[in-house]
Amino acid sequence: MSDYKDTLNLPKTSFSMRANLVKNEPKMLEFWQKIDVYQQMISKQDKKHRYTLHDGPPYANGHIHLGTSLNKILKDIIIKFKNLSGIRAEYVPGWDCHGLPIELKVEQSLGKDKKSLPLTEIREKCREYALKYLDIQREEFKRLGVFGLWDKPYLTMSPDYEAATARELARFMKRGGVRRAKKPIHWCISCKTALAEAEVEYYDHTSPSIYVRFPISNENLKDKFPQITGPAYVVIWTTTPWTLPDNMAIAVHPEFDYVWVKVGNEFYLLAERLLAICSEIFGWSEVVKIVTVSGKDLEGLESRHPFYDRVSPLVLADYVTLESGTGCVHTAPGHGQEDYETGLRYGLDILSPLDDSGRFLPEVEFFAGLDVFSANPKVVEKLKEVGHLLAQTDISHSYPHCWRCKKPVIFRATTQWFISMEKNNLRQKALKAIQEDVSWIPSWGKDRIYNMVEQRPDWCISRQRAWGVPILALICKSCGEAWFDGEWAMDIVNRFESHPKGADYWFEAPIEELVPEGLKCPHCGKSDFEREDDILDVWFDSGTSFAAVVEKREECDFPADLYLEGSDQHRGWFHSSLLACVGTRDVPPYKAVLTHGYVVDGKGRKMSKSIGNVIAPEEIIKKYGAEILRLWVSSVNYQEDVRISDEILKRLVDAYRRIRNTCRFILGNLVDFNPATDLVPFESMLSLDRYGLSLALTAHSRVQKAYANFEFHKVFHTVHNLCVTDLSAFYLDILKDRLYVSEKESNERRSAQTALYYILFLLLSDIAPILSFTAEEVFQHLPEKLKLNEPTVFGANLPKPDFQIEEQEKHFWELIYLLREEVTKAIEPKRKQGVVGHSLECKVVLYLPEQLKDELKGQETLLREVFIVSQVVFEPEENALDDAYVSTEVDGLKIQVNKADGKKCQRCWVYHPDTGKNEKYPDVCPRCAAVLEKMA
C-alpha cells in the first residue's frame, strides 16, 4: 500500500489553531501602536463623507467596569464599521474630570489639612487625582482593542473645555434664562451640596408615618359650619415629621368631598373617601358624619400649628390625591416643589431653617442643633406631649438617595442658581426637538425623555463645592443680591481660556480685576462685591461637550450623528446636553440617541459587592482575552439588560473557536492561490462554488444591514451561523474532497479557491469591527500572493465580488441542500446498526418521485460529492424496498442506504468498482489515477 499523503493538496497556514488570546493580544496592541492603526484606518476615508459619534465622558475615578467596557466596545464597533464602509468616523474619547466624587476622595486623603489649604491647592490636587485615573482608564480601554485619539482626548477640566462650559452659561445669561432664587431642591446633608435630578437615585427607606391633628378655633368655623359645636381639628398625614416645624399651611383638593365627623365630643375634618380607612387606623369606633363639603369651600379656614403659636391656613391644590393619608396635605414650602409653588400662590413664608449639614438652626424652638433624621422622634414626642398625635407607625417606601454617598437626601429651600424651563420657551422647544428632530433607539427612549422634560422643574445648576467651573456672578456684600451680565461673563471666559489652569483664574484673580469699573448694586446702590463661589452642576459641564468638542474639534461635525450611553442617561447626559444646546442654539446636539442596558449576572441580578457577583473586565481578559469580551458585547441584545457569567463566556469561547477555525481552514486552502492568475470567472465556476459564494454574500448583506441598524447581536448570530452551518457543515465539508484530491491547477480546484478567496475577505470585513484582534491576525497571515500591500486590515480595501446567483440555480441548490439533510438522516440508522461507518462506505439509492426526475437528471456524480458518499443511483419511486427511508421533507422521496460497491481508494477513500484496475496505481480509483498520471 502506497502513502499518497504527499500527492494531496493539504492545507498549510501559519495561522494557529490555538488563539492564545491572553498572550497574543498585547503583541497585537504593540503592532497597532507601531503602525498607528487609528491613522491608517481613518486616513483612507474621504473627509467629505463623515460620521460623528460623540463620546459621553466616563468619570475619571477608579478602574473601568463591565458597564464602561460594554459602552466603549459598542462605540468601537460602530467607528470601525463606518470606516470599513468608506465613511470617515473619528473617535475623540473624553473624560468627566470635575465633581463631587473626586473632591471627596481628595478631602479624605487630606484629612484635617483640607481646612487650612487654599481652594486653588485643593483644585490642583483634584486635577492630579483625575489625571491619575484618566491614565489608568485610557490603558484599560486600549487593552479592549478600542481605537481612538487616545493622545488627544477631551477633558472637562482643560482650560479650553472649561471656557466653553462657562461660555454656554454666559449665552444663557444673555438670553435671560439664568436666575438666582430660593427654592427647594434635593440636598445631600452628607456631601453638603445641592443635587440635580440626575444625581438622585431611589431606594427603599423606612420612615415614620404619623397622623397629626391641627386645631381649628370655633370662631373660625361658626359662620361656615355652625354644626361644629365642640373642639375641631383638621387631620394630616406625613412621613417626614422633621418638616412639621416648617409647616405653613394645609392643602385640600378643590374638587374632592370632605367630611366633618364627630368622635366623642370632638370634630374632625378629612376626605370622605378615606374616612373608613382612617377610622380603623385611629381606633375610632363610633363615628358620626355631620356634614359633607367640597374642598373649595374649605379655602380660608385657619388651623393652628400643633406646637407653635401661628396660623396654618387651609389652601387649595390640585396635586392632592386620595391614594393614602387623609386628603389634607401638610404643606411646608421650604421642603417640597409643589409645596413651594403653593406657597408662592398664597404668599406663605418659605421656611427652611437648616444648615448645610441638615441641622436645625438655633432659632428653631424645641429642635435646635438636631439633624433632620434625629429630629423625627423628637417631633413625634412633642406631638404626643401636646396631645395632637393620632397614630404612628413605620413604613418602607421608595425614597431619594444621593447618587454618590447613597445616603437619604432632603428637600431644602436654599438660594441656588437655575436655568428656567419656561424662559425662551425652553421646555416646549426641547419637547419639539425630542419628537421631531431626533431618532431614539430603541424607540421607547423618546417617551422616556419626553416625560422627564415635560415634568421636570427648573434646572438647578449650582453646587456648593470647589472642584468645577465657577458660576460667573458677583454678590453684593451689603444686600446679598447677585449681579451678572452675559457680555461681562464672556469677557471673564476669554481671560481664563488663556490661563494655564483655566477656571482657576476666577478663584485666583483679585476681586478688583473681576468687578467692572463703576459697578453699583442695582438693588441697594452699594459697590462692594465678592465673587460667587458656587460651581456649576457637573451635568452642565458634560452637557456642554457639544460646544467644547463637537463644534470645536476638526474631527467632528455639529450636530453629532450619534450619542450612545446607558439608559440612565435619559435623565443625565442626553438630558443635560439637550437642554444646554436647545437653550442656546434652538436645536438638539444630536441626530440620534442609542441606549444600552445594564450589565447583570447570569441570573439577571444587578452586580453588587455584597452579593459577590461583580466581575471585573480585567478578570475576563486575563482568563479569556479581550476578544471574548468583544464577542460577548456583540452576542447580546444590548438594548436590554445584558447577562454575563462564566457559563456564558465559555459558550462564547466555543463560538469564537468555530469562527476562527473556519478562517484557518480557508487560509490553509489558499496557500498556493494567486488571484492575479488563478481567479476563475463567475460563469466558469462550478455551480456548487457559486452557491457557496452566494451563501456568504447573503450573510454579508445581512451583516452590513445589521451593523447599519446597530443590531450587533444579529451580526454575531449571522456570522456564527454562516461559519458553523452554511460553511463548515455544508459547503466546506463537501469541498474538502475536491480541494485535497483534485489536480492542483485544475479548474475544479481553482473554482473552489476562487469562492474561498472572496468568502475569506467577506468574513474579514464582517468580523473586523467586533473580532478586531482576530481579523488583524488573519490579515497578517494571508498567503503572500493574497496580501494587499497595506499594513493593517483596517486600512485595506478588501476585495468584494460583484456577483449575484441566478434564482433558478439558487432554487436548485436549496433542493440539493434539503436532499443532503434527508440522506444524512437515512445513513444514521445504518451507522448505528454497524452496517456502515464513514459515509464514504455508503451507496445511496434515491427513489425519485416524478417531480424530481427531470431536475436531478444526470446529477449522480454531483450528488455523490455533495452527500460525501461513494455512489449515488437513481431509481423510480415504485421500485423502493420496504425498508427504505421515507423522507419527511420531500414528498414521494425514498432513500435506500447500502454498502458501497468496489474497493476503497487509498488516496481519496472513495469506494469505486474500478479501484485496483490500473496496473501503475493498483490501490487508487480512476479519478485519483488520472491525477497521479498528470503529476508524474
Image (cartoon, helix red, strand yellow):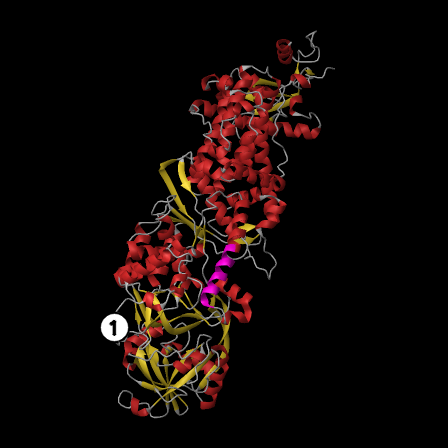
Q: Secondary structure at mark 1?
A: loop
> How packed is label 1: few (under 14 Cα within 10 Å), some, or many (20 or more)?
few
Q: Quadrant location of residue 585?
A: bottom left
Q: Is residue 287 above or below residue 608?
A: below
Q: Residue furthest top?
A: 919
Residue 329 pos. (x, y %): 37, 77
The amino acid beneath tag 1 is Pro
Closer to us: 548 or 318: 548
**Given the current orientation, which residue lies at the most extreme right position?**
1
Looking at the rendering, the stretch of residues picked out in magenta corresponds to 118-131
On the image, the x and y values in percent for residue 342 come to 31, 75
Residue 427 seen in render: no
Question: Depth check: 855 or 480 in front?
Answer: 480
Camera-nearest residue between 31 and 64 = 31
**Per the image, is 123 magenta?**
yes
Nearest the eye: 848 or 205: 205
Q: Quadrant of the C terminus?
A: top right
Q: Is residue 858 above or below residue 442?
A: above
Q: Position of residue 137 (x, y in %)?
A: 52, 51
Q: Is residue 924 above or below residue 488?
A: above
Any magenta on residue 549? Answer: no
Question: Residue 183 in the image: x percent, y percent?
Answer: 35, 72
Question: In the picture provided, is 313 more to the left or to the right than 868?
Answer: left
Q: Is residue 817 left or right of residue 884?
A: left
| Numbered circles on residues, count | 1
**Is residue 732 at least partly visible in the picture?**
yes
Q: Residue at x 32, y 91 (%)?
A: 218
Quarter of the figure that contains the N terminus: top right
Q: Main secondary structure of the magenta part?
A: helix
Q: Which residue is mark 1?
A: 522
